[in-house]
Structure formats: structure tokens, C-alpha cells
Amino acid sequence: MTPLPALQSLDDIQKALATLPEPDQDAADAAHKREPQLTKPPGALGRLEDLVVWLSQWQGRHPPAMGTPKAQVFAGNHGVTGKGVSAYPADVTAQMVANFEAGGAAINQLCQAFGVGFAIDALALDRPTKDFTEGAAMTEAEFLDAFVFGMGAVNDGTDVLCLGEMGIGNTTAAAAISLGLFGGDPKDWTGMGTGVSGEALTKKTEIVGTAVAAQAKAASNPLQVLRCLGGREMVAIAGAVLAARYRNVPVLLDGYVATASAAPLEAAQPGALDHCQVGHVSAEPGHTLLLEKLGKTPLLNLEMRLGEATGAVMAVQVLRAAVACHNGMATFEDAAISGKN
């Protein structure tokens, strides 16, 4: 296992991205070798077969395991909520964190149902990021604090890490980050979020465009885009993604916000998200476009848009199915079944 890098600047993060650990080819080869021996036609399990190879190479072992999945949710507050971009007030972030801690949220039920560990961490909810239509959302010091915090949430021995978020206003930040990274029209990236529509959605879309234009000079590279337009919970997700790569922990990203949080890493260093799958495609229209830009195919499409890592945890069952078949099926030799002519 490669030691975690020491980070004291955004340049250090860029250097860490340039020296990312590679997948374990021996583990991948072992998965490839076993798959054709199993009692089924070649390719009959479709994408499940690819997922086994992916898990093996990023866990760094064969056979792969799915005994210790974990969901990690980060929460943060956004100064841009003062512009009325959400149907709910910023106070809801802290209220939902309390709900997570009490076990009352959707993610709690899914984790309990599927045997997935759960953790919630709130980042400075009493100090929202700056309204990014008026200045960079975070200073470099604030960015680094959140990034390193996210790195610290990744534990050795986790079979897969489901990353999600909670933060009123963060679909606005996700749209701004996506626009800042990939360009286009703000309307392409901006959706209803917590339920805004009509004039409120038009206003939200305008704010996304205004923010990206205002931060265009400061957001000079992908990591700066995240600093200038993101939130602390989003930066923590990016930090967790980087640490997971170093700790041999495959990642399931949740929906639009989680994917937008990780996207600057891929934009800064192609291949930085190779150890990540996307659990589901959100009903937020910008998520579909973002996945196309990243070349990622989601595991599920359940028309969800809740966040909280709910879609990622649903996808854990797909990974478990893939591992159960690969590890438990008999081979043609074991079952005394004739193979393909």
C-alpha cells in the first residue's frame, strides 16, 4: 500500500495526482482467468464480470470481497443559498445531520437493510462558504482543511466506499463546477435540486452562469474550480477519493453532487477516477451530461435525486451479486459439465 501524500498546498495535490497508484494487474489477471471457467456462457453475466475485475484490481487481491462496505456522507453549508437557489433554508443542513445521527434518514434505512457501515461528518456548518458570485467560495487554507479531512475519513480494510453528501445549495455548486470544467450553457447543467421550478429555477440557472463568469480568472485549473465554486463537503469527497486510491479502496460515487465533487480530479489528471464507479444516474439533468464528459456508465437508474449516498448504497448490492457469482459458482471442471466446443 502506498503511503498517503502529505499535502500543504494545491500544488501538492496536483503532484499526488501525477503519481497515483496503479491497479493490481496480477489480481485483475486472476479474475480474468477464473471467469471463463465458471458454469455459464462467456460474457453471460455482462457487466457483473467487468465489475469483478474492477474490484479485484483496486482492492489489490483476488478473490475480491464485499464484506465491509461503508457509506461516508459529508455535510457543508453554502453562502450562495442567500441568493434563494434552494427550496429549503440553509438550516436544513444541520437538521438533516441530526436526522442522520438519529438514524431517521433514507440512507440510514438502506445501510441497515443492506449491511453497510455508515458515518456522517459535518464540516463547519456555522461557517458557510462565501457566496461564489461575489468571491471564491474558499480560501486555499479552507480548501486544504476540508480536503485533508476527507482523506482522513477513509479506513484501511474497507471493501468499497460509498461517498455522498448533504448541503442545501450544493446542486447549484455542482452545476457551477461542471460548467466551469466543461463549459456549455448553464441551462445544460442546472436542475431543480430540492424542488425549485419556474422563475426560481431560471434564477438559479442565471446564478450558476454569473458565478462561473465571476470566478473564471481565479479558477485557473480544475482544483481551483473546486476551490472557487465548491463547498467543504464537496472538497472532502474529493479528498476521500484521492485517499481511497492510495488505500486500495474502490469507490462508489453517489449522484450529481458527488460526481461533480470528484470530477476536478479527473480533469486535473486523466485516470484519477479509474478506481471509481458511479452508483446511479441522478434525475438531475446535469448528471447525465457530466457522466458523458467523464466517460462513466452508472450502475443503476432509479430516477433518484436525494443524495446522502443513497444511490451508491443501492449499487452495493450489484457489486455483491458480482462477487457472489464469481467466487461461489462452480467451474466446468468442478461440476463435470462440458465446456464450450
Image (cartoon, helix red, strand yellow):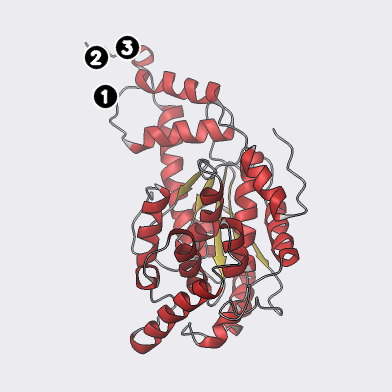
> Where the N terminus falls, by quadrant?
top right
Distance (Cα) linking label 2 and label 3 = 13 Å
Res 340 label: 2
Residue 179 to residue 272: above or below: below
The three-letter code of the residue at mark 3 reads Ala
The three-letter code of the residue at mark 2 reads Lys
Q: Which residue is depicted at the point 43% across and 18% down?
A: 33
Residue 279 x/y as whole percent? 44, 52
User: In this view of the protein, which residue sits in the foreground, 159 or 237?
Assistant: 237
Distance (Cα) linking label 1 and label 2 = 8 Å
Say whether residue 283 is visible: no
Which of discs 3 and 1 lies nearer the camera? The answer is 1
Looking at the image, the residue that sits furthest to the left is: 341
> Where the C terminus falls, by quadrant?
top left
Res 41 label: 1
Pointer 1 and pointer 2: residues touching (CB < 8 Å)? Answer: yes
Q: Which residue is depicted at the point 56% across and 49% down?
A: 268
* Pointer 1 or 2: first along the chain: 1
Res 10 label: none
Residue 211 to residue 234: above or below: below
User: In this view of the protein, which residue sits in the foreground, 23 or 140?
Assistant: 140
Distance (Cα) linking label 3 and label 1 = 15 Å
Mark 1 element type: loop
The three-letter code of the residue at mark 1 reads Pro
* Pointer 3 or 1: first along the chain: 1
* Quarter occupied by residue 301: bottom left
Mark 2 element type: loop
* Quarter occupied by residue 89: bottom right
Looking at the image, the residue that sits furthest to the front is: 217
- According to the picture, the residue beneath numbered tag 3 turns out to be 336
Count neighbours of disc 1 (C-alpha within 10 A) and say few if under 14, some if 14 to 19, many if 20 or more.
Answer: few
